[in-house]
Amino acid sequence: MIEEINIEKLLLEKGEYVKEAVDKWFEKIPKEELDKPVIASIGQEIEPRIYTPRDLYQELKKETKEKKVSKEKEGIVVEIIKMYGEVEK
Amino acid sequence: MSKLDVGVFARPDWPDGFIFRRFKYLMDYLFWTGNEVVFHARSKDFGVHDLKRDDAIRSKVEDELRGADPVFVFHASHGGNNILSGQGMSNLICCPGAYFCPEPNHEVLSDRVTYTLSCSSAEELGPEVIEANGRSYIGYLPYLWILVLEGDDMDAAFKDIWAGGAIALIDGKTTQEAYNWVQRRYEYWISYWEMNPGWVAPIMIWCLKEDYKNLKLLGKRDARIRST
């Protein structure tokens, strides 16, 4: 079991490392998948919340740059770091 | 007393948001899941009142609930804190709360077991239904996420989990047992994806973990919808 990652702390101490992991994840996505829906939530909004990999990447890139990842997205960043940032942790 | 072995299945399906994967729209994924539940219910001699698409509206659901008086209500559509949506995002069942609810009708879920695949309704609607003597309410808070890539271990994994909870109830499990079953399936798929690295894995694991965390069981934990 991998120890849970504290994103807030990691961003403050190793912001570049988080950014590199997110970039590395994005590079692995096949080009033809970048602009197709990948996840959605079934909420009450008039327009359903549907994200493409590019949507996710752009939000994560912006939030990691600002060193402030939303609670909702923290989980994705944690999973990306486990998969693409583990060696350097 | 509501009738055991009978259920109302409220299953809207309209062009809500483009997906263009296995299905064209997001709602189609929920409809697909519901098909499996209804198919299973019929195969187990469970009384099915299937309100699909244009029949999944407030007046028809209320009529079926009052007429057939079923113990079980299955719903798969968009939802909010105090609302379950029907066809075309119409107001199907609601109680006073975050979203506009001019005519609360949540008491139609009194004395019933509700299983809903929707966002957020375990926030306000679920507790109000239990307060109004609902037996049990299984829903999500805040969000219900799906990964829409096509594959047995991707979109179909969500169908497996979501349909499976309702099927467990139809097979005679208690609400607690059905809830546990759903949790175990989330855990299974999380473990599976932790061992299958690739660009999809972080998103899939995140969706599964969010849904796992957001799954709620309110009310009675020993309620059943079968007589035997």
Image (spheres, coloured by chain):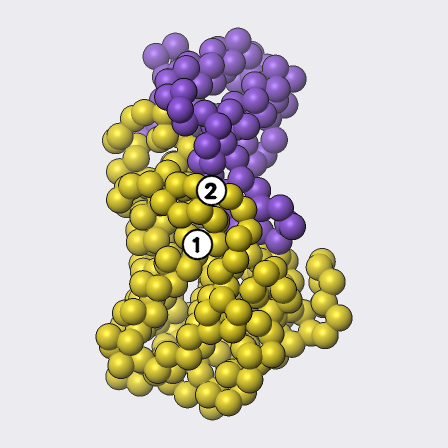
Helix, strand or loop at disc 1?
helix
Pointers 2 and 1 within a single chain: yes
Q: Amino acid at mark 1?
A: Asp
Of B7 and B130, which appears nearest the observer? Answer: B7
Mark 2 belongs to which subunit? B
The 10 Å Cα crowd at callout 2, few under 14, some 14 to 19, many 20 or more, is: many
Q: Do the numbered discs 2 and 1 sit on residues whose CB atoms are within 8 Å?
A: yes
User: Disc count in the image?
Assistant: 2
Q: Position of residue B84 (x, y in %)?
A: 58, 64
**What color is chain A drawn in?**
purple
| Residue receiving disc 1 | B28
Q: Position of residue B137 (x, y in %)?
A: 49, 68
According to the colouring, which chain is yellow? B
Residue B66: quarter of image: bottom right
Residue at 61% x, 19% y: name it.
A62
Q: Position of residue B140 (x, y in %)?
A: 51, 55
Query: What is the C-alpha distance between the residues marked 2 and 1?
Result: 9 Å
Residue at 29% x, 69% y: name it.
B39
Q: Position of residue B220 (x, y in %)?
A: 46, 73
Residue B198 lies left or right of residue B103; in this view the side is: left
Residue B72: quarter of image: bottom left
Q: Is residue A7 visible?
A: no
Q: Is residue A33 visible?
A: yes
| Residue receiving disc 2 | B19
Residue B214 lies left or right of residue B42; in this view the side is: right
Of B216 and A33, which appears nearest the observer? Answer: A33
Q: Amino acid at mark 2?
A: Ile
The 10 Å Cα crowd at callout 1, few under 14, some 14 to 19, many 20 or more, is: many
Residue B63 lies left or right of residue B32; in this view the side is: right
Residue at 53% x, 9% y: name it.
A16
Q: Who comes first in sequence, dot 2 or dot 1?
A: 2
Helix, strand or loop at disc 2?
loop
